[in-house]
Image (cartoon, rainbow, N blue to C red):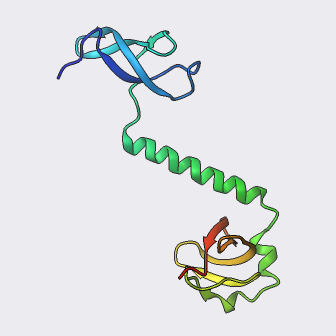
Amino acid sequence: MSIKVGDDIDSKCLPSCGPGLVLAHTVVAMDGDKIVKVKCNTCTKTHTYRSPDSASEATAAKRKSARKKREEAAAASTVDFESLAKVVDLNQAQQYSIRAPLDMHQVVEHPKFGTGIVFSLKTDNKAEVIFRDGPRLLVHSRA
C-alpha cells in the first residue's frame, strides 16, 4: 500500500497541539515516496512530517520517565536508607514474600531491589520500603 497526497496518516504534531502528541494528519506534499508536509486534522497547521515513535521507542521513553520519577522521589524523600540503616541490623534481613506480614523497621531482602527497610505501613496490606535506590511500595500479608 502506497501513501499519496490527501491520505490520512499519523504524525507527531507541533508543540502547540501538545509536545510529542501523535495525531491524525493529512498528507499535503511528497517527494517521491517520502512524506514531506502534513496538515494536522486537529489544529489545522501545516508542518513537516514527523514519524511517530516505534513501539519500542515509546516503551523506552516511558521507562526512562518512570525511572526519572523514582529518582526524583528518592531525592525528595525525607527517609534516607543510610540513616535508617544505622538504627537497624541489616544482617537480620528476611526474604521478602508477598504472603509474609511486614512490620515497622523490619529489614527485608527483595529479589530485585535488594536490601530494604520498612518505614511506613499503609492500608490494604501495603508498606513503603526504602531501598538504596529509593522508596518502593510493596504488598504484604496476602493469602
Is residue 142 shown left or right of residue 71?
left
Is 4 drawn above or below residue 19 in the view shown? above
Image x and y of residue 69, in percent: 65, 51
State the residue in front, 67 or 124.
124
Quadrant hosting residue 29? top left
Q: Residue furthest left?
A: 1
Quadrant position of residue 109: bottom right
Query: Farthest residue in the bottom direction?
Result: 92
Residue occupying the point 52% across, 13% down:
43
Task: Looking at the picture, tell me which residue is in the foreground, 44 or 11.
Answer: 44
> Would you say 66 lies left or right of 5 here?
right
Residue drawn 68% across and 91% down?
Answer: 91
Rendered location of residue 126, percent (x, y): 65, 72
In the image, residue 32 above or below residue 130: above
Q: How many marks?
A: 0
In the image, what residue occupies the spot 40% across and 21% down?
24
| Residue at (82% x, 84% y) in the render | 87
Say which quadrant the N terminus sits in.
top left
* Image coordinates for residue 67, horizontal then vertical, percent: 59, 54
Location of residue 14 in the rendering, given as x and y in whole percent from the top left corner: 53, 19
